[in-house]
Amino acid sequence: MKYYEINGKTCFTDHMDFQCPPEADWKEIPEPRTAEELSWLFFREPGSCRASFLVNHEGLLWEKEESVDWLNSRKLEENKALYGKQGGCTEGKCAAALPKWIRERITAGKVRAVNASHPRFLELLSGEAFPAGPEKKRVHILAIGDVGSMLLTGLHLLGGDVISRIGICDISDQVTARWEFEENQIAYPWEYDALPEVEVVKPENLFDCDVFVFVASKGIPPVGSGVKDVRMYQFENNAKIMANYAKMARESRFKGLFCAVSDPVDPLAKTAFLESNKNEAGELDYMGLLPEQIQGFGLGVMNARAAYYAKRDPRFSRFLTEGRSFGPHGQDLVVADSIEHYDDALSRELTELTVTANLKMREIGYKPFVAPAFSSGALSILLALRGEWHCGSVFLGGIYMGVKNRFTENGLETEILPLPDALHDRIRTAAENLKKIV
């Protein structure tokens, strides 16, 4: 193990030939046992992994690549042992190489991993690439249609503790005028500043904010159209819209949270990442949005729908206390009735009910947009801004995958659980199918 002081940050790595960028102020140092916080330096192709993240399991230090194994403590332990035998990390001494004091820092949430191969390495190390920002965030929402208007209302009513102001933008001036008028007439008597003010913003000012929420969509098939997978029907058109705004984010050097809410959430989040990281020649240079800077918000409503059915059928009741949801907001969703007492058949049945819940609403004669706007949109975004656990799609080995996650002072953290093999296989299949889309 080697230790460095780089621009005031205490770092460690098992790469013996590490060379810091010449513009950095750095030096090799003795083992810094008294350091409160540490940065682990790893080296991977920038498009294959998060640029920075919280290390919440020792096994993450020794992984050769980012994958869905990162959600599974059993796989992390297996991989660590395997790489050790093969000499894949620290000359085959993964466990022995890590001092006890570093393990203690990991347990305390004080170790952040940073990709030293990323072109913005020093910016990442300093925390300036994706800063925490002010205590209260300025939020801008693009497109105030069915979902956007409900999401706006949720953020306005419930977000006063973490939101300072909300800006709205739409192709229709009439729509934004209506919602500015409506929302600002919602107030507590005699506490007229308790809720964040809503204002109209111009397209050129969309990224003058801390949080950008993309809810734009070219259109949803009408009720009775016969379209079974509405989300993928929307992808081609919505991806073109997303690409334009991702490039705007790059040009604006946006450093806030980029939220993808439109369907299909997961491929659109990946589209935002790719398009924002292309230069004028269309080449990937990774100078745009960071992978962890983008999050898809679609899993929240799927988790809530699973809970809806679990409350109404005793066979699924374990989900309410032991269950989890993973994967995309669509056909490859994975619902687990329980982690500790996983039942594959029951979990697949609950998954099917959850995935087809939107069709039930269409059979009633309505578009299913209210629950998604609140469960996936407003509630999940507010939890994210508060640094609390929530459902969202995060970058994981080249795709965006829905998981339980939260933002911490030392980076994005994803929940790691001892997943049963059958459940892990379902998650891996979902990931493989997501890779085929974009």
Image (tube, rainbow, N blue to C red):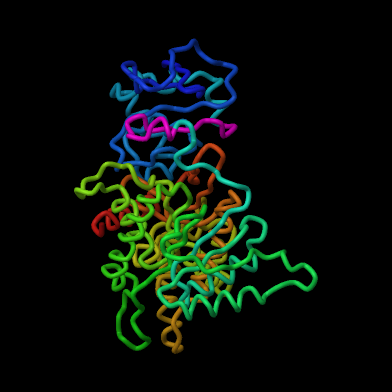
Q: Identify which residue is drawn at 27% across, 58% down.
A: 433
Q: Is residue 348 above or below residue 91?
A: below
- Quadrant of the image for the N terminus? top left
Q: Identify which residue is drawn at 38% across, 50% down.
A: 424
- Quadrant of the image for the C terminus? bottom left
Q: Is residue 121 shown in magenta?
A: yes
Q: The magenta stretch spans which residues?
A: 107-124
Picture coordinates of residue 9 (x, y %)?
A: 50, 24
Question: In this view, which residue lies farthest toward the left?
Answer: 281
Picture coordinates of residue 287 (x, y %)?
A: 33, 42
Q: Is residue 85 above or below residue 65?
A: above
Q: Quadrant of residue 230?
A: bottom left
Question: In this view, which residue lies farthest toward the top?
Answer: 30
Picture coordinates of residue 196 (x, y %)?
A: 64, 63
Q: From the viewer's perspective, is 210 left or right of 355?
A: right
Q: Identify which residue is drawn at 80% across, 70% down.
A: 190
Residue 27 showing in the rendered view? yes
Q: Is residue 364 shown in magenta?
A: no
Is residue 251 or residue 37 the one in the foreground?
Answer: 251
Residue 343 showing in the rendered view? no
Q: From the viewer's perspective, is 23 left or right of 379?
A: left
Is residue 423 or residue 138 the one in the foreground?
Answer: 138
